[in-house]
Amino acid sequence: MSFARILCLILATMALPVYAQPSAGNPALNIPLLNAAPDLQDFEGMTPATELAQQMARVEGFVQREPVDGVAGSQRTEVYLGYDERTLYAIFLAFDTEPQLLRANLSSRESIDGDDSVELTIDTFNDQRTAYSFRVTPLGIQRDARWTENRDFDVTWDAAWESDGLVTSHGYMVSIAVPLTSIRFPATDEQMWRVQFGRQIPRLSEQMYWPAYSTRQQSRLAQAAQMTGIRNVEPGSNSQFVPYAFSRSANTLNRNAAGGPKLQSSTELELGVDAKFVLQDAWVVDLTLNPDFSQVESDLPQVTVNERFEVLFPERRPFFVENADFFKPTDANLLFTRRIVDPEAGLRFTGRQNGWGFGAMLMNDEAPGLNRAVTDPLHGEKARIGVIRGFRDLGGQNRIGTMITERQLADGFNRVAGVDGRFLLDANWTAIGSAYRSEQEPAAGGNTISGVQRDLLIEHRGRNLFAHIHMIDTDKNFRSELGFQNRWYRSDTSGVHSFFNVTMFPEQSVLTSWGPRVSASYQTDQAGVKIYSSVGPSVQWNFNTTRFNVSVTDTSETLRPSDFRGLPQTRVYDYTSWGAQLVDESLSQLTVDVRFNQGEALNLVPAAGTMPDVADNRRVDLSLLWRPIDRLRVDNTYLNTTLETRRGVKVFDNQILRSSWNYQFTREISLRFIAQYEETIAGPATRLSDSKNLNFDVLLRYVINPLSAFYLGFNSNARNFDIIETDTGRELIAADSLTKDGEQVFVKFSYLFQR
């Protein structure tokens, strides 16, 4: 299908009328305009004690979702609402008959898992698709996120807002104040939002909501209450600026230094700014110069040894994180912004009005031209990147849209364009589909190739049945240089993967729920040759704060000569594994998550001159969250993977040990220490070599809000190597001992200015 035909189809479909969204059965809430800002002192004694508190709208009657759907919450919860021309206010009174059992720790922002909490979720466009979520613990610690239907929460989204918390003899109180400058909503005289309030009680594994958020219906936001009363407010500030400065002094290994590898000292100063401008109350322009790379964040460890496909690491840069869901219409990740490695500047334009949405992004990337020889044609070249996204809401959560991505480098380009849609078939069934076409011309010249990717997801979410059926068909010549293609989306594949969960809820039993699950997949290449299939039954039992499951998986995987260099002909490998997982949160100070897998796996790193084969595999993943005192959080992770041939010859033993200690002095000030050690011991049956890596990370943080913060850090890294002098210069060789290959001291500061 040509781009012209795709565009005609988009325009014709977008001409359809917008139908009103159903609202039958949704409770209504009208909130008042306040003449002052309420706080917890207005609710002394956990009651509306002042005239201001008594003016606020009141909500009560929370209903459980877990563990018993539809039953009244075990603890009483009240919420009081109001607003002024600048801020939306919510005061939660969370009563508890056993307040001494509350779980509340003084921790850094976002690190609230395992604690009691309350939650405010608002769908400001009343379209039942996305929402802002603000969650707070009894000590006022924040977690914010963006909710997208069928995708869960995206916790990488950050906003500037205020919260407070207080533990009392009757439970706890929480205040939430969300500046209207931190969220987006339509430019209308009176707002019509959807709102939902939640409360989590970890010791009881209880989740309760108002209005009722039942597992019997798929959509979360379709069950939210209609909220009116907010009048004559402006959506967002006219402008916002977040400048940042990053400075470091480093001593790192330069492998390409004159005369051979050596340690070299360097200093670096980076200045950048993110800016936001609101136009006509509905459209937002974001600019960035030298985007903030979030150097202070640390990716969680992942096993990469013997992995056939690329491992996904999440985006953390603020410019790319905000509105990320705007540019991800389906599960096909056609825009993975970590592909934009070293941008100089960028522009993003987004807006929604009258059922229409539009977004665009322009940016360059210096990375392709860096570290290339002067004689290389791509030396100093920068990639030019453009993205356009448009959609039309059809009501009832139905939407159709289009997106075009393009990456240009020198005389070459990669362009992807197509259409997508999401349709709510009934209260439990959803269909999401897309058809995208790519065109690619290499930077060095050559023939232009093109291909199509078709994607259809059908999903049922209910209390007793969760069914997921996903069909993907990708041509051999489909390319998406800005996308992330895992096993299912890679070129020259066609297939389906699915799972079916059945959950039962026994009455008067120590079991809160249990049920079987069956996952199955089947994948071929475009010639119809089977390249992968698997069947995996499992069973899970939930005992209040403890979960346990066991599983067995039979896999058949095909490697073609194009998949593994030197393979003389296509080979099929069949292997089986079983696994078990135990998660326990019974203790307030300790959370345990242990996974064990035993069986067979495909050895993709065989010894030189030999081909891949099925080997015996054992993997242990252990995670321990320990809170010895309410200010100290210790996260420990241990990953161990062992592979041996069927004759008992070692392939490799890989282990990763990470320990992160965070001490919170105040809500704003914390000190974090991370130690991570990774080791691979290679055996005779692999082409790998022994490797060791030891990393230390110390970080002092002063965080006013996500956009205003100061960081002082130190990082040190060591590997198993030595530098020796030879007749021709210095040479890098493997060694048993560790040698420091880099260390740095850095300072980072950012601050939010807005009007």
Image (cartoon, rainbow, N blue to C red):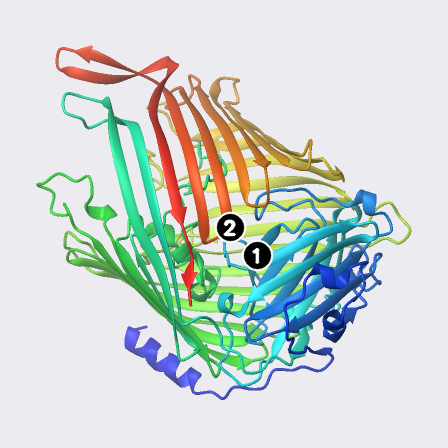
Query: At label 1, which amino acid type do we have?
Result: Asp
Residue 297 in the image, given as x and y percentages of width and height = 45, 42
- Give the label, 1 or 2, closer to the camera: 2
Quarter that holds the N terminus: bottom left
Tell me: 452 left or right of 227: left
From the image, tell me which residue sits under label 2: 704
Quarter that holds the C terminus: bottom left
Q: Residues within 10 Å of mark 1 (few under 14, many from 20)?
A: many
Query: At label 2, which amino acid type do we have?
Result: Ile
Q: Residue furthest right?
A: 508
Residue in the foreground of this view, choosing between 327 and 210? 210
Q: Is residue 721 above or below residue 216?
A: above
Q: Which mark is residue 144?
A: 1
Residue 10 in the image, given as x and y percentages of width and height = 39, 79
Q: Residue at coordinates 68% horizontally, 68% vertically from top-left?
A: 196
Dot 1 falls on a residue whose secondary structure is strand
Dot 2 falls on a residue whose secondary structure is strand
Query: Can residue 43 be seen by looking at this rendering?
Result: yes
Q: Is residue 352 above or below residue 42?
A: below
Q: Real-space Cα distance between discs 1 and 2? A: 15 Å
Residue in the foreground of this view, choosing between 202 and 572? 202
Tell me: 102 left or right of 227: right
Q: Reading the chain from its start, which is encountered first: label 1 or label 2?
A: 1
Q: Residue furthest left?
A: 375
Q: Is residue 620 above or below residue 387?
A: above
Residue 304 in the image, given as x and y percentages of width and height = 44, 35
Query: Can residue 313 be seen by looking at this rendering?
Result: no
Please identify the quarter of the rendering in which residue 190 is found. bottom right
